[in-house]
Image (tube, helix red, strand yellow):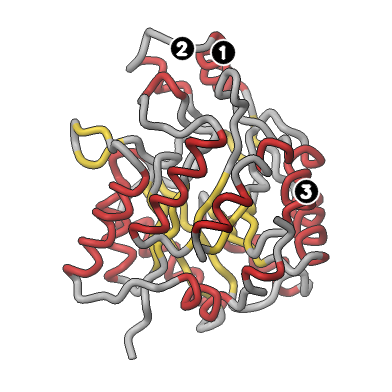
Amino acid sequence: MAKKVIITCAVTGSIHTPTMTEHLPTTPSEIAEGAIGAAEAGAAILHLHARDPVDGRPTPDPDVFFQFLPRIKQSTDAVVNITTGGGPTMTIGERLEAPRRAQPEVCSLNMGSMNFGLFPVLEKYDDWKHEWEKDHLEGSRDRVFKNTFTDIEEILTTGNEFGARFEMECYDVGHIYTAAHFLERGLVRPPLFLQFVLGIMGGIGADPENLMHMKRIADKLFGDDYEFSVLGAGRHQMSLITTSAILGGHVRVGLEDSIYLKKGQLAESNAAQVTLARQILEGLSLEIATPDDARAALGLKGGDAVGF
């Protein structure tokens, strides 16, 4: 039987800012509604950040997470994936606060330190809703997103304590080798869940050839002991998830990764992107994974074992 394709939806995040689109969820209520809508549209996994309800600034505060996590759990059976990336200006301790309390089935995990260039967005916008937004983007010219081996080990050790599995975000080929390092040390176990991230300035470019190379390296290192998904940033979102599906992988969409549905058309919701992704996949005669299918494929602990 052909493998079912897992759709992950990244509902909001630290990359995009409220000014860029009025449709980006920022308050706890909006994040809950966006996540529930995405699950109803077919997303098996919900990748979640939190934002300050006052000014939309990315926040690691678990109290904010807990304003939307219970509502999402009550309304959907989707797998909840809580970020440990948070944002480049947060400490590892801050980034772990919400996962420690919520004990989700999945945590995202950035697999290496990198330049994370957001500043090109400044050329497209000159009107900012909040003062912090422009400074945040400008600061990325001279900011390293720190994810050292020590940092990764701390996140893995913490997540292992409450039985989480990891969405291992690989922004370049070297990050796949870092995943292999931690597999050899026994800090992760198969099947690994690798998220190939293409199109972030400072990471690997959003080319199909790069995606095929990343898959080739992962095949060499892990054989059949991994699953992969693809995140194409910005305008590359839908083309690269289509390529991923053709190659036998899973897909990630959501307003964290792209604010558009297609060229020149803003996505009015996360659900709209999930719906389009589902149409693409079903047009390829592929079956969409349910949350329980995702749990079985990734070896997750189950929604009854979380802390919210």
Q: Which residue is mark 2?
A: 129
Q: Amino acid at mark 2?
A: Lys
Q: Earlier in the sequence, mark 2 or mark 3?
A: 2
Whole-number angstrom distance, CA of label 2 to CA of label 1: 12 Å
Whole-number angstrom distance, CA of label 2 to CA of label 3: 33 Å
Which tag is nearer the camera, tag 2 or tag 3? 2
Q: How many marks?
A: 3
Q: What residue lies at 52% left-to-right and 82% top-to-bottom?
A: 223
Q: What residue lies at 59% left-to-right and 44% top-to-bottom?
A: 68
Which of the pair 86/48 is nearer the observer? 48
Q: Which residue is mark 1?
A: 135
Q: Which label was assigned to residue 151? A: 3
Q: Position of residue 288 (x, y in %)?
A: 33, 72
Q: Secondary structure at mark 1?
A: helix
Do the residues under discs 1 and 3 have CB atoms within 8 angstroms?
Answer: no
Q: Position of residue 181 (x, y in %)?
A: 70, 67
Whole-number angstrom distance, CA of label 1 to CA of label 3: 26 Å
Which of the pair 43/201 is nearer the observer? 43
